[in-house]
Amino acid sequence: MSGLSRTSADLDPRRKRLLYQAWHRGIREMDLIAGRFAEAHIADMSDAELDQFEHLIEAPDHDVFSWITGAVPVPANYDTGVFRAVKAFHTHETPIHS
């Protein structure tokens, strides 16, 4: 189960690939974080933002999850506008899996 609720039919190949990769991470929590963010924003992201998102989702899941939850500081090379948007997208007011 991917959780995907958005069709990728209208996306270019790079966006389709990133949307797929966002939903197929190593841990389910990151599927939900990256996948839901990608569904909401992938169609409108600039090439520079796509570069940042691609770099972020290539990082190890446990590291990204720790950065998003604030358990450890975000390394400077990942502290981008897209990372901050992903973090802001998930306010943690409800469980990630809901």
Image: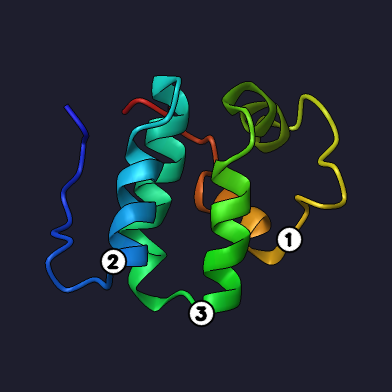
Mark in front: 2 vs 3? 2
The residue drawn where x is 67% and y is 56% is: 84
The mark that comes first in sequence, 2 or 3, is 2
Label 1, label 2: how far apart the Cα atoms are: 23 Å
Q: Secondary structure at mark 1?
A: loop
The residue drawn where x is 33% and y is 38% is: 23
Q: Secondary structure at mark 2?
A: helix
Between 71 and 38, the one lying in front of the other is 38
| Label 1 CA crowd tier, 10 Å (few <14, some 14–19, many 20+) | some
The mark that comes first in sequence, 1 or 2, is 2
Residue 74 showing in the rendered view: yes
Q: Where is residue 29, by image quadrant?
A: top left
- Where residue 40 appears, x then y in whole percent? 34, 61
Please give the label number shown on residue 80: 1
The residue drawn where x is 65% and y is 54% is: 83
The residue drawn where x is 28% and y is 66% is: 13
Q: Relative to residue 13, is residue 89 depicted above or below? A: above
Label 3, label 1: how far apart the Cα atoms are: 14 Å
Q: Is residue 85 left or right of residue 71?
A: left
Total label count? 3
Q: Relative to residue 47, is residue 77 depicted above or below? A: above
Q: Secondary structure at mark 3?
A: loop
- Where residue 37 appears, x then y in whole percent? 42, 52
Residue 88 showing in the rendered view: no
Badge 2 amino acid? Pro
Please give the label number shown on residue 46: 3
Q: Which residue is mark 2?
A: 13
Badge 3 amino acid? Ser
Label 2, label 3: how far apart the Cα atoms are: 14 Å
